Image (cartoon, rainbow, N blue to C red):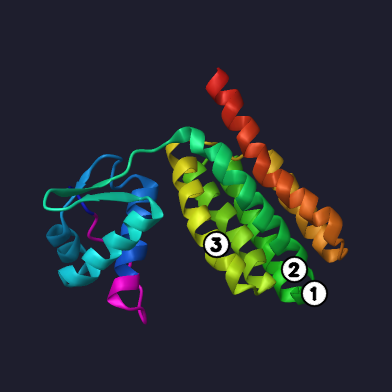
Amino acid sequence: MPIPTNHSKPVRETAKKSAFKQIQQWIIDGTLHPGEKLNDLELAKALGVSRTPVRESLQLLEVQGFVEMFPGKATQVTEIERESITDLLPPLAALQALSAELAIPNMTEETIALLEETNEEFANAVHAKDDFAALKIDEAFHHIIVDAANNPYILSMLESLQAHVRRLFFHNSIILTEKSIDEHAQIIQLIKDKNGEKVTAAMRENWLRAIEEFLAKKAN
């Protein structure tokens, strides 16, 4: 089970939270492969923590569907169910759309400028065909809006859904195109215009289009 040793170790977090986030990220990006057996001692050594927070993290990851634990035998990364994207994206799109509407009253000039800068970075990654970076920056773009919505319940629900969708995006090699750049720009403009009705529709379309692209790719 090869584990990177040069990963960043977040500060001011509990060992459990830090371990959970890092193991989840390794599962999402494929560092830990679907079906791979996990050794809590190796993980603890790589993360620089004791085995207890690793075991607690694995239990949380099992609840979320990222690992499967077999008492007395092994813990392994769950397989990827590619078709689940059609179940995951609609509720994610609805929550993201609601976040965009709720974010409008809280938007500052600084936050809008950050959205514009982030979309420029996203455009650069798309044009450079750096698909991994494009996915990460796309997530950052949407997270700015979710943060501005300032609703902890939406944030909590989105974190779990987003993690599963992110994993599917990485493993299905879903490519974000210039269409997404234009959609981001439209979302920013609608936020500036304080048009809640249209921004929810634009945000929903931005996410649901991925289902159409996935099904089209599958058909080919």
Identified at 29% across, 67% down, the residue is 19
Label 3 vs label 1: CA separation? 22 Å
Task: Please state if 214 lies on the left or on the right of 168 as rendered.
Answer: right
Identified at 50% across, 38% down, the residue is 84
Which residue is denoted by mark 1 in the rendering?
105
- Residue kind at label 3, given as amino acid type: Met
Q: Position of residue 108 (x, y in %)?
A: 76, 76
Q: Position of residue 57 (x, y in %)?
A: 29, 64
Label 3 or label 1, whichever lies nearer to me, is 3
Mark linked to residue 157: 3
**Disc with the residue nearer the chain's start (2 vs 3):** 2
- Give the magenta part as a residue range: 4-17
Q: Nearer the viewer, residue 154 or 215?
A: 154
Q: Dividing the picture into quarters, in which one does residue 102 lie?
A: bottom right
Which residue is denoted by mark 2 in the rendering?
102
| Circle 3/circle 1 CB separation < 8 Å | no
Identified at 48% across, 58% down, the residue is 160
Q: Position of residue 14 (x, y in %)?
A: 32, 78
Task: Please state if 181 lies on the left or on the right of 45 as rendered.
Answer: right
- Residue kind at label 1, given as amino acid type: Pro
- Residue kind at label 2, given as amino acid type: Leu
Pointer 3: residues within 10 angstroms few (<14), some, or many (20+)?
few
Label 2 vs label 3: CA separation? 16 Å
- Whether residue 7 is visible to the viewer of this picture, yes or no, is no
